[in-house]
Structure formats: C-alpha cells, structure tokens
Image (cartoon, rainbow, N blue to C red):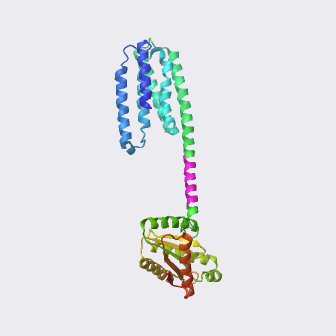
Amino acid sequence: MAIYSYCLLWAGTFIGVELTAFEPNTPHLTFFAVVFAVNGLFYLLIRSGLSERFGDPSLTILQMAVGILLTTIILHYSRELRGAMLSIYFMVMTFGVFALDRRRMLLMAAFTLLCFTGLLIYEWINAPQQAIFSYLIGHWIILTLGLGWFIYMGGYIHNLQLRVREQRERLREAHDRLSAIAVRDDLTGLYNRRHFLERLEEEMSRANRESSPLHLAIIDLDHFKRVNDTYGHHAGDEVLHRFAQLAAMGLRKSDLLARYGGEEFVVLFPHTSSQACLAALERLRHSFSEQRYAFAGELSSAFSAGLTHYQPGESAEQFIKRADNALYEAKHLGRNRIQQAG
C-alpha cells in the first residue's frame, strides 16, 4: 500500500512539475528513488522475519515517518497547491489508524506538526517576502485540526479492535470449554461415553484395514454402591476420581480410556497383544487396591474387568457385548479379577 501510494504521489508531483504548479527544479526523481529504496528495505525486513525482533514488527511508525518527511519536502516545492497537498499528511496518518494506539498516534501527529512547522519557519527565514502570514497560519490550523481528528479516531478504532480481540478470545475460550464438555466427563476428566463410541468405530475400521489387533476392556468398580451408601456421594466421587487418575497414568497414551457410565470405565487397547493388555490391567488393579482414603482408612478398593479382542467384521455392539459378558463372568467368579473372553 505504501509503494502504491508513493507511485500515485510521484505521478501527481510529476504532472504538477510539468504544469508548473510545482517548482520546475523539484528533484522528484531523487526523492522518490530514495523513498522506494527505503520501502524496499522495509519490505525485506518484514518478509524475512527480521522485523519480528522489533517492538513494532510491521514497522508502521518508521514507514509513517518516511512518508511524513517526504510529504514535508514535497510541500516545500508545491507553490500554490500547498493547501491541497496538506491532505497527503492525512493519507500517511491513515496508515496508523488500524495499527497504533492513541499515544502513538499522538506521537506521529506531533512529529507531523513539528515537520510542517519547521518547514514554515525555514521558508519564513529564507524568503520572508514570499510568505503570506495568513496563509501560513491557516494551513497550520487546518493541519492541527485534521491531526486532532486522526488522534481521536485512531484511538477510538484501536479501542474497538481491542474489544473485538477480547471478545474473540472469550469466544475461543468458550468454544474450547464447550468442546471439552462435549467429549469429557466432568468428574473424572476422562473421555465420555459418546466420544468413546465415536472413537471405537474409528479404531475398528483401522483394525479391519490394517489387520491389526484391537482389545476392549470394560471395568466396573466393586461394591461401589456400598461406598456411596456408607460414606456418602462425595466419597464415591473421590474413589472414581482416584481410579481415573491411576488409570490415566498407568496406561499408554495410545490407549483410549473413558468413563462409560456410573462406576463403569472402558479401555480400548490398539496394536497390542492380549498378554500386554492383561498385564496392564493387573498393574492397575494392584495399584488401585493399595489406595487409602482420608474418609475411610479401612476401605479397600477393587475392580472387576472383562477383556476381549476384536473379531474382524463384528459390530461395535457385538464387540462391547462380548467384553460385557466377560465382565459379568468376572463378577460371578467373585469380583476383584480380570476375565478374558474366550
């Protein structure tokens, strides 16, 4: 945008020189060659990523400063077009409206006013006979009022951007929370039943494609209703949460652990053998049995589990049913054990 704007300004200056609206000795080729070279440097700094080291990665202030200096020089040669050419300052200030806060917009406005005031003083000293005081004051007041408007609007737009950014961040956080609620169980932090069933279908499809082993375990905490009835629901919640923590730490990252409902949990073991699954469940059962609770030092926690392997072509319902049957058999045999389906 800066280079495009400078091309337009160069074209206007060139036409002004040809029509004698500018001083005939205006060295516009030199001025704009320098400006294009400087903007080429800005472009390389931004594209290379080197500008990221600066506090202003877009180099907005530096780009505006170059534009303000060039505009001041052009105004020196502008003759009777000076009043119209003052609008170039406002074009430069537009670059900062969406990038600078009110304090930095005030700084750039002050720099603009300082450059123009310096130009007026320089011309008054060097050619007092050509200076028309009323014009000089009029131009200075017009520029000051215009810059004041940019300071106000720049700050207003910057504050709007901040509010929009904050709202967008809040929406993102709300979306993340809703996403977590959609797939996570509130109490244990594990995946919920709905997410588990979705992932189960995916893993079964992968097992069919790759002919890879897939095992499913359904775990039920033994005598959990007795814990709730004896010690209260807060105690039951503590037992559930403790089991979830142990299971999450003891299983592989590739294993899918979820709360299936109530005191039931499920574990999906992809790409592993039955022996490895049994060993992992036994370690978890042993670790869980060693847990002690502040609300009941005498409480000994245990679980029963049914384990089965996926048979190619069967449905998710059939797969789960076989694991559930193995769990029922583990309970029938006395609980606190892991039973593998035949």
Q: Residue at x 55, y 84 (%)?
A: 329
User: Which range of residues does the magenta coloring cover?
Assistant: 165-179
For this rendering, which residue is in front, 287 or 339? 339
Q: Residue at x 58, y 81 (%)?
A: 295
The answer to whether residue 210 shows anywhere in this view is yes
Query: Is residue 261 shown above or below 160?
Result: below
For this rendering, which residue is in front, 153 or 292? 292
Q: Position of residue 259 (x, y in %)?
A: 56, 71
Q: Position of residue 54 (x, y in %)?
A: 39, 43
Residue 251 sits in quarter: bottom left
Residue 145 sits in quarter: top right
Query: Is residue 157 shown above or below 185?
Result: above
Query: Is residue 224 shown above or below 96?
Result: below
For this rendering, which residue is in front, 9 or 301? 301
Q: Residue at x 63, y 77 (%)?
A: 233
Question: Which residue is the extreme one toward the front?
Answer: 313
Relative side of 260 to 210, left or right: right
For the stretch drawn in magenta, the main secondary structure is helix
Relative side of 215 to 224, left or right: left
